[in-house]
């Protein structure tokens, strides 16, 4: 089942013999990191085992938000918002970014209280946001036929197009001098005198002094082969897009049973905002104790599933260690393209149409699944690896990576170059686990 259609990316063909830094992963985090590094004068190779933005970076909701984030992410998200504002001009390509506002609704007093409590976090980053009721709420939800008592609105939040944004950033990095190679898996890191000295790719060796692992859902597997433990699991989220429709909401909305945001093409990206599927695989058991507090906190939105002939068998058969001279799991499986949950698609679409009858005039054009890279505490790892100088990790964004991606790229580049970090990276250190 193919995911979203992506624009063509003309990759580089010749593998350089030496660069300052190799970035592993062609999603929005890797592309943003590569752009930041090359703009600072570093020679950079970006390696993607499949296609640019082939996995979660093109499959997410397209939200660019401060609202409802973990407070530890807010300073970095504020920096990301500043970058998004000028990203089209900086890259010379359209990202689809719009400051359209995001509204989280409440049907019950308990939900309202939760939103009001979270609102205090915005004061720490000097960002606007307010609880809306009555006519103000109705104005933002014109045509809404559901039942809500209030909503928390962040006018500075917005949306961008996942199928455009990462390509724009990668193209800009390439134009600035970075080498960007697709269908080129990095098999392993190499070391000399206890620090990074290069990487072995499927096309040959590249010498370097810094490596950034921004491999999304693949990062745990890659790092494990290097002897580095990263607690990370994959969570399935399912998304649909509609044909163009007139009269729907301009701002993105999260409500009971659905989330939606308007697309550049006039259609909507819609998901069931409260269902995420956790396939039971060997890592689910290996990491069970680390993830137990998260499971208990998020149990209402998680659905555990065992498919003995599906993901379990696939991951149980996957090599966990390998030698660099032989093909790796990354070459055997170029792209994670899971089937969406038809139940989640059906529920989200029905709930959205019921809430906004104008959507009944639209068709479901496509649906897809995406695997989110999740950490036990729900925030990313953006960190150097203490035991291996020259190795850096930027992964585990737990469903929040698209919007924060440009800021994460800046912070990751700060760590690589030794520049003063744009925000305190302490909360994102790998050693916290």
Image (cartoon, grey):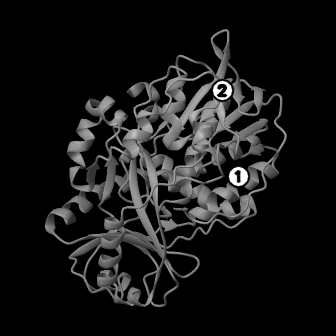
The quarter of the rendered structure image containing the C terminus is top left
Q: Nearer the viewer, mark 2 or mark 1?
A: 2
Q: The residue tagged with tag 2: helix, strand or loop?
A: loop
The image quadrant that residue 323 belongs to is: top right
Q: CA distance from mark 2 to mark 1?
A: 28 Å
Contact? badges 2 and 1 (CB < 8 Å): no
Q: Which mark is residue 150?
A: none
- Numbered badge on residue 170: 1
- Front-most of 20 and 269? 269
Residue at coordinates 79% horizontally, 31% vertically from top-left? 19
Q: Residue furthest front?
A: 309
> Along the line of sight, which residue is nearer the eye, 111 or 265?
265
Mark sitting earlier along the chain (2/1): 1
Residue 26 location, x and y as percent?
64, 47
| Residue 127 in the image, given as x and y percentages of width and height | 43, 59
Q: Quadrant of residue 206?
A: top right
Q: Which residue in the structure is indicated by mark 2?
A: 326
Residue 60: horizontal and vertical position, in percent?
48, 60
Indicate left or right for 317 with 135 as reference.
Answer: right
Seen in the picture, residue 231 relative to 266 is either above or below; the reply is above
- Is residue 393 depicted above or below 278 in this figure? above
Q: Is residue 324 above or below residue 277?
A: above
Crowding at mark 2 (Cα within 10 Å: few <14, some 14-19, many 20+) = few
Query: Which residue is found at the position 78% from the left and 50% from the top?
Result: 11
Pinpoint residue 163: horizontal percent, then vertical percent: 60, 63
């Amino acid at each position: 089942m193919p995911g979203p259609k992506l624009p063509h990316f003309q990759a580089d063909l010749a593998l350089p013999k030496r660069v300052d830094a190799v970035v592993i992963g062609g999603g929005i985090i890797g592309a943003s990191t590569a752009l930041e590094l090359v703009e600072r004068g570093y020679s950079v190779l970006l390696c993607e085992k499949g296609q640019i933005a082939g996995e979660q970076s093109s499959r997410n909701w397209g939200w660019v938000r401060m609202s409802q984030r973990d407070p530890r992410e807010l300073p970095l998200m504020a920096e990301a918002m500043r970058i998004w504002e000028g990203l089209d001009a900086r890259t010379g390509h359209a990202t689809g970014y719009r400051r359209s506002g995001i509204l989280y609704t409440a049907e019950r007093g308990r939900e309202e209280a939760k939103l009001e409590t979270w609102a205090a976090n915005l004061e720490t980053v000097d960002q606007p946001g307010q609880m809306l009721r009555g006519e103000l709420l109705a104005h933002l939800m014109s045509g809404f036929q559901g039942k809500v008592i209030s909503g928390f609105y962040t006018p500075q939040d917005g949306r961008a197009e996942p199928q455009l944004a990462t390509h724009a950033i990668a193209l800009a990095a390439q134009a600035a001098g970075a080498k960007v190679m697709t269908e080129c898996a990095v098999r392993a890191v190499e070391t000399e005198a206890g620090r990074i000295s290069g990487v072995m790719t499927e096309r040959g060796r590249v010498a370097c002094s810094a490596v950034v692992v921004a491999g999304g859902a693949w990062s745990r597997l890659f790092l494990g082969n290097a002897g580095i433990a990263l607690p990370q699991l994959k969570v399935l989220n399912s998304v649909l897009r509609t044909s163009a429709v007139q009269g729907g909401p301009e701002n993105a909305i999260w409500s009971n049973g659905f989330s939606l945001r308007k697309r550049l093409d006039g259609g909507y990206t819609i998901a069931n905002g409260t269902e995420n599927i956790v396939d039971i695989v060997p890592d689910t058991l290996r990491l069970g104790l680390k993830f137990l507090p998260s499971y208990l906190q998020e149990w209402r939105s998680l659905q555990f599933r065992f498919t003995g002939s599906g993901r379990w068998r696939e991951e149980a058969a996957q090599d966990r260690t390998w030698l660099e001279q032989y093909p790796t799991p990354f070459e055997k499986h170029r792209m994670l393209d899971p089937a969406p949950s038809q139940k989640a698609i059906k529920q989200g679409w029905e709930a959205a149409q019921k809430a906004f009858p104008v959507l009944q005039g639209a068709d479901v054009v496509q649906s897809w699944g995406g695997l989110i890279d999740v950490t036990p505490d729900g925030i990313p790892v953006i960190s150097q690896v203490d035991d291996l100088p020259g190795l850096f990790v930027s992964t585990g964004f737990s469903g929040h990576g698209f919007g924060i991606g440009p800021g994460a790229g800046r912070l990751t580049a700060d760590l690589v170059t030794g520049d003063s970090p744009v925000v305190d990276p302490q909360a994102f250190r790998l050693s916290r686990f």
